[in-house]
Amino acid sequence: MRILANRMDLGFQKYQAEYEEAVMRVLRSGWYIMGKEMKAFESEFASFNEVSRYLHSMRWNGSGNESIFCAGVASGLDALWIGMKVLGIGPGDDFIVQGNTYIASVMGGTINGARPIFIEPDVNYQIDLNKIEESITSHTKAIMVVHLYGMVCNMDKVVDICKRHHLYLIEDCAQAHGAMWNEQRVGTFGNIGCFSFYPTKNIGAFGDAGAVISHDPDIIHKIEVFRNYGSQEHYKNEVVGANSRLDEMQAALLRVKLKHFNDLTDERRKLAKRYDDELKNPKLIKPVEEQGSYAVYHQYVVRCRDREKLIDFLQSKNIGVNIHYPIPPHLQEAYKYLGHKKGEYPITERYAQEVLSIPIYNGMCEAEQSYVIDALNAF
Ligand SMILES: Cc1ncc(COP(=O)(O)O)c(C=O)c1O
């Protein structure tokens, strides 16, 4: 048997007729940028995240607004940097972010000239909530929480810290569509929730795509203007913006995925539960879903001290795996200018040596998962 680390073709095949219908609808419409499909997806994605009964405990920002608004953009990175730009986070500002995240989270702030302050992750790979407050200074403008691997930390605590210190709360939900804390969707706790629809994501497009959601219609309006050369009216430009539009084709395809999303998430959660129950090898540390959270298992990440040997072993059995991520942002060439040293963030660095994402994808069959489980237990 050969198992790939991830499969996207199966997800396409399952709803092939619907995807083909969506593509043809767009092609025949004669309208390919910023049309009906984008508007429909924005509104459907906003409602999906809104689920108003979930918004019981938090009223963010004094806006008192329970509704969610959404602006489609061209990628997850654009969602982050344009969102942060619109919030006014820039040179002279610090933003707090976990050290073990994907580099795009960090770039979302640094593109705007802000400085990342890295925080070590907790045992579940999420930002260590006990280490945030000691890092807040007069320069801190925002906390960015990344719901890494589709898991969720205690958002009540994050909201409390942000409120007490008057900080923006940005959620990087690129890996966590539909995940919840106390039955409230991620992306709705703070000022902005930023999503990627990169093809491998839980709601994946067939190319690049992203979105920002917010309770604040003004923020969403500013993003709508910014993403289109700073223009609302043809050939009238209010601000220097960007070209970062969610195109009609991706929007139409995303609408299909969104329609089936609950089933797709259930499937991932069942696969994860089976790994939880049946992986017995003491050399592997399994992820733990925090009480109150609803994880969506973008990845199922184990830790192993002998990771390189484990990878070789799995390769000998034709099982593909991934490492998310082998080099943490503070040690990347791109961030040399920040002056961080090896050893400065020992937990982040240890995770970079030990984490392993094992196969989990929609369409993974029982026999395939059994094969992976047997191999991992035999190691
Ligand atoms: C945590 C995280 N943030 C941001 C991004 C950036 O998204 P995109 O690839 O759509 O730019 C990604 C995905 O690649 C991600 O995993």
Image: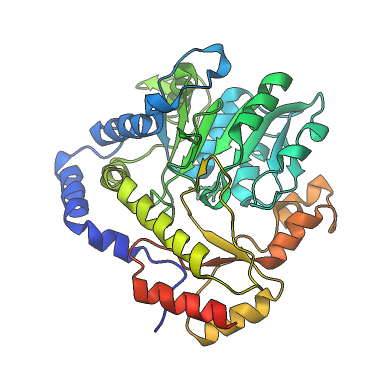
Quadrant location, the N terminus: bottom left
Query: 23 above or below 153?
Result: below
Q: How is the image coloured?
A: rainbow
Tell me where residue 249 appears, x and y as whole percent.
28, 45
Q: How many marks?
A: 0
Q: Residue at x 53, y 18 (%)?
A: 59
Left/right of residue 111 with respect to residue 210 in the rendered view: right
Quadrant location, the C terminus: bottom right
Q: Nearer the viewer, residue 347 or 326?
A: 347
Q: Residue at x 44, y 20 (%)?
A: 221
Q: Is residue 205 visible?
A: no
Tell me where residue 25 appears, x and y as whole percent.
16, 44
Query: 334 above or below 158?
Result: below
Q: Nearer the viewer, residue 340 or 158?
A: 158
Tell me where residue 266 appears, x and y as whole percent.
36, 52
Q: Residue at x 60, y 41 (%)?
A: 153
Left/right of residue 96 with respect to residue 357 in the rendered view: right
